Structures are given as C-alpha cells and as structure tokens.
Amino acid sequence: MGGSRVPTGTWGDEWEWSVRHRLAAELDAAAPGVPLVQQLLDLEPADVDDAALVEMAAAWERVVSWAAAAQSRVVQELARRRPAGSDGGVGDELAARLLLTRAAAEGKVALAAGLDVLPEVADALARGELDVRRAAVLADDLAHLPAPAAREVAVATLPAARECTAPQLRQRLRRMEIVRDPEGAVRRTERARERRRVELSPAPDSMAWLSAYLPADDAVAIHTALTAMADQHADEDARSRDARRADALVDVVTRWLDAGTAPDGTPLVSRQGRRPHLVLTATALAVAGLSDTPAHLEGYGPVPAQLARRIAAGATWEPLLVDARTGAPLARSTRRYAPTQALRDAVALRDRTCTFPGCRIPARRCDVDHVEAFDPIAERDQTCPDNLHALCRHHHRLKTHQDWSPLRTPAGHTVWRSPAGRTYRRPPEHPPPDRPPPLPLPDGVHVDFVPPPF
C-alpha cells in the first residue's frame, strides 16, 4: 500500500517527485500508528496540494489496516476465553455490540482466526502493507488448509499480494492450490458445493441485489441460458440486454410462486401456517391514494406508496387490527403453548425480522418464541403478543443454550443480556399509525382522528 507515486518509474523522477511534494513523500513513508493519526488530524485538506491529498487518503487506509489488525487481536483473545469446542457466541456478541449483521460479525471473527494462524499476514496488515480486503482473502482462502501449509502458502504469496488487487490475489491462490494439490482441490470443491446459497441484499430506489453462490459450471450455465433468452427478439426490444436478462430470470422463477407449486407439481412448503407469498403492509389511506405514507415489503423494507398502489391492483388484502397509539398489530391471547394463526401473523407483521440486534432474517422464516419461558401450570395468558417474539433458529438456540436472555419492554423494545453482562436493545420496527390529510373544516371546528383498524 506504500510506495512511490512516480509517473515514469525512474529513480530520477522519484527523487524529483519527492522534492516537489515533500509533504506527500513524508506521508508516503510514514508507518501507521498514533503519530501518523495525529499528523493526519492536524492537516487541513483544503490547505494541501493534490499529491498530498492522495497520500493522505493512502495514509488513512494504512491506519484502517493497522486498526483492523489491532481489533483482530482483541477478537482472538475474546474467542480464547470462551468455552472450548464451541464458537462461544463471539460473532453474536460483536453483531449486537457493533450493530452488524451476523454475517458481517462472523467475517470479523473469521479474519481474526485466520490472522492468528498467519502471523506474517497479520504483521503485513498491521504495517499497512495489505488492506483489510486482501488480508481477508488470504485468511478465507487458506482457512481450509492445515496451519503449516496455510502459512507456507501465505508467505510465498505475500510479495505478490502487496502488488495486486483482491480479485487478482484470489485467482493466484486458486491456481496455486490446484497445481499444488489437485486431489485436495477436488475435495474442497465438493465441500464448497454443500454451501451453495442464494442471498438478497436491499438496494436504494426500491431495488435489490439477488446473488447466488453456485458451482462454477451451474452459474455459467444459468447466465448463458438467461443471455440466450434475453437475445430472443432483441432487435425489436428497447430494453438493454442486462434488463432483458433480469426480466427473464423473474419470468422463469416467479411462475412457480404464482402457481403455489414446485416444478414437479408438489405444493410449496408453508411457513407460519401460510403458503409462500409476498407480504406488503400498507395503510388503507396509502392504498386509496389519500396518503404517501411508505408501505413495507417483507424481506426488503420501506417502499413508496405508489408501488403499493400498483401491487394492490392484483393483490389480495386482509384487514389488520393495530394499536391506535403505536401502530403495532394486535391479536387475541391464548393460554395454550402454541400460538394461534392470528397471533403468528401479528408477531410476524410486528417484528418483521428476528428480534436479535442486527439480524435481518424475515420474521415469517423465524420461530415464534416465548420471551419468558412458558409455564404449563400458570393460570395467566402467557401466549400473548407481549410475550412472543420472532427468533431465527440460530438465535433461538443462542437463547436456549448460550446464556443470552431477552425481555420485552412495554414500548416494544427487545432487550438482550449477553453472557458478558452487557445489554443490547432492538427497537420496534412497525411504523406509527397513518394520519389523514387535513380536511377543510369551518372555523372553530376540530376533529380528532382515530386510525382505522387496517
């Protein structure tokens, strides 16, 4: 990450550049640490030339690497203190404390574990010679190797790693592994195949990224098929090729959701008592065009009321009773252990996701769990909205086996206490009730509006 910023690469030009841009050269040579941080804080970006600005950005990047290496040492020590033979919930603790998704927190844990095995990579990261992404590539791609072999490959790769991008580094490692151990590469491919998956990531403007982790031949085959479908009648279509390819994917897949069956004709598996479907929650006023209050698309988040109105034209809508003060869905309690369908629907609509801080698993894919454990001899209603919440299977097990304890506040916050004794708060996700547009009323007349039960 360091190195001279020389136009032609000659020693004379390097010396001339250093003379003309002394501050930039000084920053280029500075090792990351507290003195460099203080120097950068003391510099005013508006007062330095372009060369110095570039080196300030590069210096801050080295500081980020230095800080990441220090953070990894802390995570390593935390993991060592947790019970042997389990992950100890380190990733979950970091997710709650840093307000990260579980995947992002587990990424920090994996990086720390990899750097513990690869001290040379850890040192290069701490010196700012590698950025976090390239260090993560080395840690991730070598994690499956025995520690001595992983360290050997890392040391051999480090000189090239300092001079290439993260994707280039990953390509080098893959080729090196295949050449070095072709049979092992086949075994690793089979293990990796078992982790194939599809993921959804919300994006701005009511858009989303749908990504798939697939065997290479399957991924190329799907892309080739979508491209072939996109090229049908391309001369008569004003859409871009990318747009036609995306639309072809939607057409191929959603027909089975609409039919409610898999391609072999068997019914799709129900969750929370209902067949798979899109869930869009909107106020009656927004659907009627009297309000622009955002709607909520389950699995994505807020979407404009205009989109809700467009979907409403071909959708089936159900009325929903809500609390007039908070907007939280309401349902009748029961003394039975198993919640009714109405209770499950109300909890899923209220919580929207797993109620562990940072977890984004949709509530309809979660368990509906009792916050306070169900007591079969108690005579009060325990299966009620205030004592139920959505928990994904992972965080349900965490609550049961890892000494994490939740409670639900009257305001709808879920407060978790970790094994370390710290508390983390997950606020409610349902919006406040909608209000109608002001009506033209005679002077002196005032009307209090009570939101309708939808």
Image: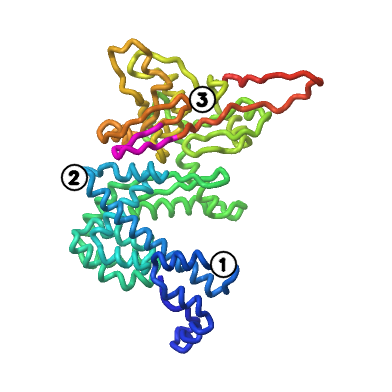
Q: Which residue is mark 3?
A: 328
The colour style of the image is rainbow
Alpha carbon distance from label 3 to label 1: 48 Å
Magenta stretch in the rendered image: 415-426
Q: Is residue 391 left or right of residue 247?
A: left
Rendered location of residue 269, percent (x, y): 37, 29
* Pointer 1 residue: 45
Q: Nearer the viewer, residue 151 or 141?
A: 151
> Residue 374's quadrant in the figure?
top left
**The N terminus sits in image quarter:** bottom left
- Which numbered disc flags the more N-terminal residue, 3 or 1? 1
Residue 403 position, x and y percent, is 27, 34
| x, y percent for residue 172 | 32, 67
Is the residue under label 1 in contact with that under label 3 (CB below 8 Å)? no
The residue lying at 36 percent from left, 46 percent from top is 103
Residue sitting at x 34%, y 52%: 108
Query: Residue 368, image x and y in percent?
Result: 37, 26
